[in-house]
Image (cartoon, grey):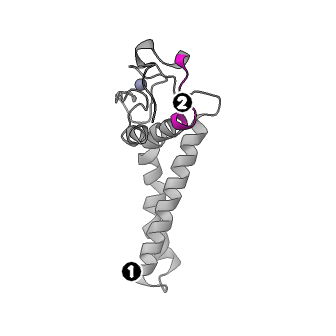
Amino acid sequence: MKVLLRGLTLACGVCGSRTLFRKWGMFAMVDDCPRCGLHFERMDGHSLGAVAVNTMTSSALVLTVVALALVIIGTDASTSTLLLLAAPAGLIFPILFDPVSRTLWNAIELLMRPPQANEIREEFRHIKVR
Ligand SMILES: [Zn+2]
């Protein structure tokens, strides 16, 4: 659970470092954790998991907005009204959620495949990722 909380708060899942993004723009993630040295792109195609996390979360948000609109307005709500309500959630949220989706995916991936000793600096090798 600790590693997932770290992922949700833009921190490294191994050491908790919060300096994973460059100063200009939350969308430029560093390649390696500056504290523990974990290389975030742990295998080819690793970032596709972050895209999947972002897509699933954004889709769930859009569906929630539409469902709430149908409950509040009623089932006679027009399609254009539903689109106007759901579009911001579907267009803006995925952009804002992108940094979180990357660190969250990294945390999920660390739980599925704990880091090997050669992936992190020696002083962090005793940490159990949970
Ligand atoms: Zn780290």
Q: Name the residue under label 2.
A: 114
Residue stretch rendered in magenta on the structure: 109-117
Q: Which residue is drawn at 55% across and 15% down?
A: 118
Task: Residue 96 in the image: state x and y as whole percent.
Answer: 41, 47
Label drawn at residue 72: 1
Q: Is residue 21 above or below residue 66?
A: above
Q: Nearer the viewer, residue 69 or 37?
A: 37
Residue neighbourhood size for the residue with mark 2, other residues' Cα within 10 Å, grouped as few (<14), some (14–19), many (≥20): some
Q: Residue type at mark 2: give it.
A: Pro
Task: Residue 117 in the image: state x and y as whole percent.
Answer: 53, 18
Task: Residue 109 in the image: state x and y as whole percent.
Answer: 55, 36
Badge 1 marks a residue whose secondary structure is helix
Left or right of 32, for residue 15: left
In which quadrant will I find the N terminus? top left
Left or right of 9, for residue 41: right
Q: In which quarter of the image is ligand 1?
A: top left
Report the residue that reaches farthest toward the right: 44
Q: In this view, does 19 lie above or below 95?
A: above
Q: Distance between the residues labelled 2 and 1?
A: 45 Å
Of labels 2 and 1, earlier in sequence is: 1
Foreground disc of the pair 2, 1: 2
Q: Nearer the viewer, residue 121 or 1?
A: 1
Badge 2 marks a residue whose secondary structure is loop
Q: Is residue 39 above or below residue 46?
A: above
Q: Residue at x 44, y 85 (%)?
A: 74
